[in-house]
Image: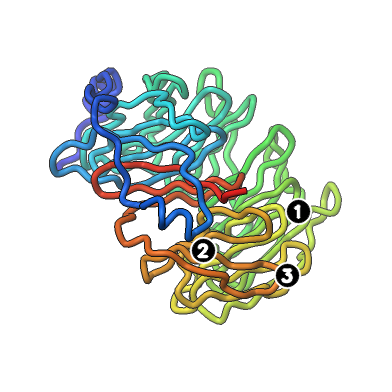
Amino acid sequence: MQRMPAGMTSLFLAACLLTGGRAGAAAQVLSWPLSKEMLRHAQLELVWQENLAVAEGEQLDTMTVLDDRLYVRSNQNYVWSLDRRNGRLVFDRSIAPAGFPLLGWTAYDDTLITVIDNQLVELDKNTGSQRRIMDLELSIVAPPVRNSQYFYVSAADRRLHVFRADDMVRLFRVAADNNSLITSILADDDLVVLGTDAGNLIGMMADAAQKRWQFDAGGPMAGPVVSDGRCYFLASKDTQVYRVDVTGPTAATMAWRYQTEAILDREPRATATVVYQYAVGRGLNAIGKQSGQALWVLPEGIELLAEAGGRAYVTTKLKTLAVMDNATGSKLYSVNLAKVTRFAANTLDANIYVADEQGRVACLCPAP
């Protein structure tokens, strides 16, 4: 597709963002290919189910858990926002023309932040409507983030560009000492943490180009850095998972590293007690969050769906749901998920979110 001029793209996006939701979703008869018998065998309960109005030829592409919402996006860049506790539809609308590339999907207060066709876009979290579309004249390479005062944007010039959030005036820019590409950003009002394609984890002041500390992994980052307070978990292309703790205003140290002996291509999933890491050709690894020791490895495991009561609910390449006991490292049982085509990774609570190709979305949870 030929790229449109920036101004024309903004008008096109605005037209899409003003489009109303699809009618008819609530009128569809709800059904779900997971039978009551299957749920009983899996020791799961159905919390809610919804039919999304998927157009002919359209397919669900991604499912993302953010705070109290479940965001489902189709391959046509149509988005449904659901209250993940009860399945209530918050909004549904097209956020970009079909085929336009999207980068990132994060939330700040009542705003959703993404990059559409290389433009920074803010959407209202409750309506999906456009708030701002900003052409920063940068080639954006990592999902931007913000705190109460600033936006942090990584670009192909290997610089982190810092903008004042209110009016998007650029205040300063910084680079890693080795001029590596910044591929991951985390920010709060006190600290900004950067991950680079050279394996550097860098802490800097939130309001000034001043480095506080740096940790160097053995290889490039494989996906975004994950945080839990001042603990950071990162997957490196040196085949290892690292936990790095901030131990002082200018100090960060490695708490542990875990060898997967395989290629890593995505970020870890961290819950209250366990870090889960997929390794290509090796399956899903469960690592003690405090100890850094292996709890179990499931060779067919692909992704963590949720964790509850010391059990991990894992989707597998065999199209099954496997239930793992984190204390013993054993697989308790598995059930057939052949008709499930999309799922969300949820590290916040025990809810499991799955969908099929007809646009039927279900929330499951472990039975008491």
For this view, does 169 lie left or right of residue 2? right
Query: What kind of element bears circle 2?
Result: loop
For this view, does 57 lie left or right of residue 235? left
Q: Residue type at mark 1? A: Trp
Mark 2 Cα shell of 10 Å, populated few (<14), some (14-19), many (≥20): many
Pointers 1 and 3 in contact (C-beta within 8 Å):
no
Q: Eyeballing the image, is 249 above or below 95?
A: below
- What residue does disc 1 label? 213
| Residue placed most toward the observer, 226 or 288 | 288
- What residue does disc 3 label? 292
Please tell me the numbered disc located at residue 90: none
Q: CA distance from mark 1 to mark 3?
A: 22 Å
Q: Eyeballing the image, is 313 above or below 219?
A: above
| Residue placed most toward the observer, 227 or 175 | 227
Mark 1 Cα shell of 10 Å, populated few (<14), some (14-19), many (≥20): some
Residue at 61%, 52% (x, y): give it. 226
Asked if residue 10 shows in the view, the reply is no
Please tell me the numbered disc located at residue 222: 2
Residue at 37%, 60% (x, y): give it. 337
